[in-house]
Amino acid sequence: MLAGLAAVMVIGIVGVNIVRRIATDQAIANARDLTEADARSVEENLTDAVLAGDPAARLALDRSIRSRLLSHHVVRVKVWDASGRIVASDEGALVGRRFDLGDDERRILVDGGVSAESSDLQRPENARERRFGHLLEVYVGTHTPSGTPLLFESYLRYETITANGNRTFVAFVPALVGGLVLLWLVQLPLALALDRRLRRSRDRERELLVRAIESSDRERRRIAADLHDSVVQDLAGSSLSLAALARVVRERGDTELAGDLDARAADLRQRIRDLRTLVVAIAPKRLHDEGLAAALEDLASTVRARGIETSVEVAAPLALDRAGEALLFRGAQEAVRNTIDHTAATRVDIAVANGDGRVRLRVHDDGAGFDPVAPQGDGTAHLGLALLADLAVDAGGELAVESAPGAGTTVVLEVPVG
């Protein structure tokens, strides 16, 4: 809407200036037509006798000029011959004087036609017109009955031209401005409809994202429960059976087979620990029951199981709802997963603190680090962080990743309190 209004204003300003210029040009064109008609009206008195200096002929021309041409708008009239001599004028002191004619004036005198220009009152031939102020000079080519070329010149008050132009301008501007305003008003319903559509689209996207997250959480919990209640329990039973079988075989004296069975039982117990670690990563049961600190300790235990030194510091109390807890835990999961998979770190520090109405998670490792600007592999290496950043923005928070080759990586996730 604002862009449309700005466009309408720009078009309006340009259009108004164009209309004003056209109106002024039209007023000047009208002045040329008027002067050409004035010249034709006194042509009968522009005789060779006037050029010869006949007093009676000059008097008749002077009366014709004063009675027909001079008015509040037309303040001076001059008639020139080819030599630059003023042969007639309402200002008697100018008659008989010679001045240099410009190229444009000579062309019109010889070829005929009409020309108009703003009067240069500093020129000698215009000295007696200075008292009138800004004037418009209009030249018309004419001739005597015998064909001698003459130049008819009329001086008009420029304020008259301006007034005529303003009348034309005022006649056209309301239509121009009204049309532009109407155009903008027509755009308003389109802009409002587009705004509503975008809002509905954003709401729908947010709703779909929430549903996807909830569905993902439910599916993760279901998978974790299935693993824990079936596979993990079955493997635990198999491990106990192997250990019991190893004791029986050892009692019978077959120590070699007993040792092999003990090794298989130990390997199976390690696989059980790996599966339990996976269950904790998929769905931390203690997150909402015992709080974020307990869930992060479970997550840290999975990292320690891989030989990576890990510390956890969680400020208390944390003013977080279930969604905030889940988002911070997911951020810690993603940071730890990247540390394990990509950085070859020997230490990971996880810290959660309150401050400025926000809860801040910071996960730092001493691994190889990376260049955040450079593309990583096939472009999917940090897809999880990109998705986590979108979730943080939707929650009103912010995700930041600081890293450099050889300097480790720090992931900071902030979410609003509440």
Image: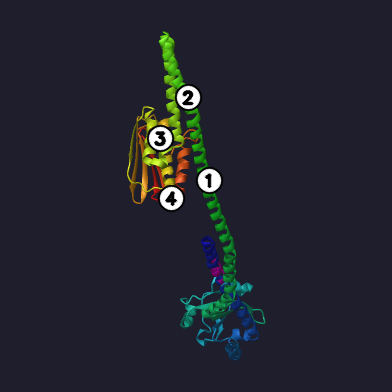
Q: Residues within 10 Å of mark 2 (few under 14, many from 20)?
A: some
Q: Is residue 18 magenta?
A: yes
From the image, tell me which residue sits under label 3.
Answer: 336
Q: Label 1 sits on what residue type?
A: Arg
Identity of the amino acid at label 2? Leu
Main secondary structure along the magenta-highlighted residues: helix
* Residue bearing mark 4: 396
The reply to whether residue 85 is visible in this rendering is no
Q: Which residue is mark 1?
A: 211
Residue 18 drawn at (x, y percent): 56, 68
Q: CA distance from mark 3 to mark 2?
A: 27 Å
- CA separation, marks 2 and 1? 34 Å
Gap in Å between the C-alphas at discs 4 and 1? 18 Å
SS category of the residue bearing label 3: helix
Q: Percent position (x, y) of residue 169?
A: 57, 75
Mark in front: 3 vs 2: 2
The amino acid pointed to by label 3 is Val
Label whose residue precedes the other's in the sequence (3 or 4):
3
Q: What range is drawn magenta here?
A: 14-19
Residue displayed at 43% across by 46% down: 322
Task: Tell me where residue 160 sits by quadrant.
Answer: bottom right
Using a 10 Å C-alpha cutoff, classify the residue at mark 1 as few (fewer than 14 neighbours), some (14 to 19) or many (20 or more): few
Q: Which is more N-terminal, label 1 or label 2?
A: 1
